[in-house]
Amino acid sequence: MSKKTHAAQRGTARTNRPERRQVEMRMLSLDQWLSADHRARTVWAYVESLDLSELYDEIRSVAGQPGRNSVDPRIPFALWLLATLEGIASSRRLADLTERDVAYMWICGGVSVNHNLLSQFRVEHGELLERLLIDSIAVLMHKNLVTLDEVTQDGMKVRANAGSSSFRREPTLEDLLDQARSHVEGLGQDDSGQLSARQQAAQKRAAKDKQQRVEQAIDEIEKIKSQREQSRSKSKSEPRASTTDPEARTMKMGDNGFRPAFNVQISNDSQSNMVIGVEVTNQGTDSGLMKPMHDKIKEDYEATPSKYYVDGRFIKNDDVTDLAKSGTAVYGPVYQEQKQLDAGKDPYARKRDDSDQMAEFRQRMGTSAAKEEYKKRSLAEFPHADCRNRGLHQFSVRGLIKAKAQVLWHVLAFNFLRMNNLGYLEAVMEG
């Protein structure tokens, strides 16, 4: 059976076909090319309003001295903010977009950036990102747009950049460390000339990096042992640590499976639903994580929430007691509430080990008013859902510090959208 030609297939149909050899002159600047209402313009205006002095202080190329100009730090900052808003997490993908997507080309304005610069920028400025988060909320508090009177907190497990097979017990790690040290010592002794100096240097960097990760994994084993002793854990299994990401821990995930992950804690103001605090930990449970976040909020904003909404995993006698003493009432479900009700027991009655504040918490949560008030805790799910929808299913970086920096990009993107939707963005930009 002979195949029809394109002309025969079209028949008498009239279609617009591509013409790629026609010479044209398009006298358009990047600014004219980008639509006037594109999100990239708002992102750039917001980034221009930020105080990035510390980034400029790190630049060694200065006026009157030799050397090439550095890339203006506002460019990678705006690129990552826009990329996060659009669910892009790969530095290589972002670097490609700066050469073929109008919005990213507009942000660059002819300045060339590569994936190495973008990759380093994303994880090297976590402290700055957190300061910008705090400063923006502080400005809104000063303008009485955010009060922090009611705060919610919730955690979510995010897959670490490590495989389950990378976890090793201490004896195996000791053997791997000996092998890594021998490998590092043996590098550079090959005089065959098959490798260039650059290749040899790359090999040595990779070998030293592997040795450092194994050493860190051994240190993490000791931390796990210490934590088990302090918590009086009854676990009989030998502790294990990953040679890929030593700070990662195997955690129970939302689907009841167990995988290497980090525990991302996010607190937000329940009235504006803006994120006010972020922490990333390798603790597998949320128990005991309420007080540290509450203390951080008090320190960062010099304000004490009157109401604090959490789920049942956070409820702990000591934490509830400490928050109550500082003037914060905790709202959360009583442990095994439904089981005790089914068994004919009163879950809201004072227990033997309860402090006065914990007993008051139980009594309060037994009232219909408190249960109605507790419904506000559902607002804590919105930042988590937004992070998930924008691609935060697995970290593309390793270690707690870098993981927190990646989360902060997502949080800044979430707050950026909230401020824009609520009409708060101009107030923050004005400072």
Image (cartoon, grey):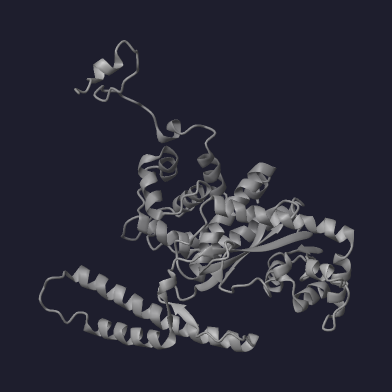
The spot of residue 54 in percent (x, y) is: 51, 62
For the point 45% across and 34% down, the residue is 31
Which corner quadrant holds the N terminus?
top left
Examine the rendering and report whether any part of residue 63 can be seen. no
Viewer-nearest residue: 248 or 251: 251
For the point 55% across and 55% down, the residue is 410
The spot of residue 247 in percent (x, y) is: 49, 75
Viewer-nearest residue: 198 or 163: 163
Decide if residue 348 is on the left or right side of residue 202.
right
- Say above or below: 222 vs 103: below
Decide if residue 99 is on the left or right side of residue 161.
left
> Residue furthest toward the top?
12
- Say above or below: 326 vs 100: below
Examine the rendering and report whether any part of residue 135 can be seen. yes
Can you tell which quarter of the image residue 51 is in? bottom right
Numbered marks: total? 0
For the point 82% across and 67% down, the residue is 342
The spot of residue 349 in percent (x, y) is: 88, 74
Can you tell which quarter of the image residue 308 is in? bottom right
- Say above or below: 146 vs 58: above
Viewer-nearest residue: 133 or 54: 133
The spot of residue 206 in percent (x, y) is: 30, 73
